[in-house]
Image: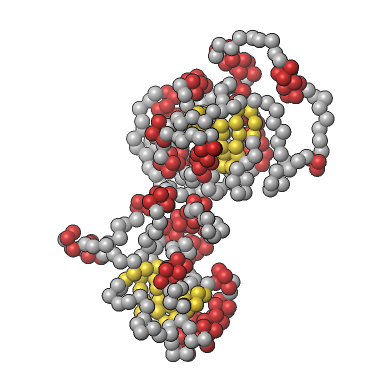
Amino acid sequence: MSTTKDASKNKVAEGRTAKKRSAKDLDNDAGASSSKIQKVHPFFQQRQPGGQLAEEETGPFKWLQPLGPNKTCLHGVHLTPVSRPKVAAFDLDGTVIKADIRNTSTEWHWWAPVVPKKLREVHESGFSIVFISNQAIKPLPLKNWKEKVKLIANALGIPFRIFAANTKDQYRKPMPGMWDELEAIFAKDGVTIDRDQSFFVGDAAGRIYSKSKSDFASTDRKWAINVGLPFQTPEEYFLGLPAHENFSLPGFNVSSLPERRSHLTFRDPPYLSFPVPDVLPSSSALLPKPSAQEIVLFTGPPCVGKSTFYKKHFKAAGYTHINQDTLKTRAKCVAAVLDAISRKESCVIDNTNRDVATRKHYIDVAKKHKIPIRCFHFTAPVELAWHNNLYRAFIEKAEEEPRRSLVPYTAVIGFKNAFEEPTLEEGFSEIRRVNWNFEGTEEERKRWSMWLQIDGK
């Protein structure tokens, strides 16, 4: 258990000798303990962006300004941590201290008696100490937790940096946002982190002990995989126990996607298999030759590249882009189709168009005006759609355009529940299947291939 006495013993154990305190020390003591300091009404206190009160930190531990576009990544430092190439990163609750999910008080206990000794040793051996924590909790428990961190800092007595994600966004493990912030801070100091020499310790490791007992989550292990750090559990690092090899990483990862190969792969000899083209069938040109007026209707879940496909294949050919996210209502989309027809232009209806009834609105227009309508069916599963959604909202670099907002999960899963596969009987002159294919640099592919989740195990 942490106490003021523990903190004093730690200082003696580290070989510190009593010295006459400076005026600065006395000022700090007075600032920390005096009950005569006049309190300021919250109305007059300085506020941070987002309306939060700015914290006045006077002790050795300081909570700094939160990081991120929405100030959702808490950031604190104890003493003056030095940026070093080797980083020893630790989860906090359940790893360094015993877990207290309710945080109803500031009381805390070391996860094991050996923890502070091991942390001091790794600091003295040349590592930067960094704590990485998920804390999407309500304001009062969060306040208790932040005060608890100050007590831990005083008891530990060595420099460290701490990051904590307080909402479900790019900072919540296993999302890599907190690591990205750490790398940026170190880069400003001219330091590049050596991932091979660094490591991360966490208890959310996905370990399976029996049919009814397992770790509450696997997000710490996934985070280590995402950022490229060697991973250990508290039992391995602090107690020296062997690694628990039976673990599971639930949820979607792009590595689970089947390799893009034709249906021949599954029933014919391997030598008959070959990569599947982006669009099937691929025997005819994507655009009609000679050019002729037509309506093209997309169908598929959100976030599977429909708009990108339009820009790549139809925009340069002069097809009008019709999108309900922009126009807001189906009636306006239908009106836009009629307007394109009146101008003798072809158009692309870039919506999810998930069922027969929705698609009928556009097919009826095509029939009435005797214009052919083709369907492009984007076949990506909704699990990939949600993954892509997280990637483009939180991970993808958006230098030329504003970062896209996260599509609600209900919209993604709602498509799956209501989807009806398109058929020629509906009135389409042709149906083509569009296969998902990530397009980007190797570094972008690496980040897209991460474990991306903001909830769940």
138 left or right of 187 in image = right
Residue 439: x %, y % from top left = 39, 59
Which residue is found at the position 40% from the left and 85% from the top?
292
Which residue is found at the position 63% from the left and 28% from the top?
61
Is residue 301 visible in the rendered structure shown here?
A: no
Residue 389: x %, y % from top left = 49, 57
Which image quarter is the N terminus in?
A: top right
Residue 49: x %, y % from top left = 69, 46
Residue 251: x %, y % from top left = 42, 50
Q: Residue furthest front?
A: 190
Q: Nearer the viewer, residue 281 or 445?
A: 445
Is 411 located above or below residue 92 in the figure?
below
317 left or right of 37 in image = left
Q: Nearer the viewer, residue 210 or 92?
A: 92
Is 384 located above or below residue 113 in the figure?
below
76 left or right of 399 in image = right
Q: Nearer the viewer, residue 361 or 278?
A: 278
Instruction: Specify the color scheme.
Output: secondary structure
Give residue 158's quadrant in the image. Answer: top right
Q: How many marks overall? A: 0
Is 90 located above or below residue 339 in the figure?
above
Give residue 166's quadrant in the image. Answer: top right
Q: Nearer the viewer, residue 150 or 397?
A: 397
Which residue is found at the position 49% from the left and 23% from the top?
123
Which residue is found at the position 71% from the left and 18% from the top?
25
Is residue 335 visible in the rendered structure shown here?
A: yes
Is 356 located above or below residue 85 in the figure?
below
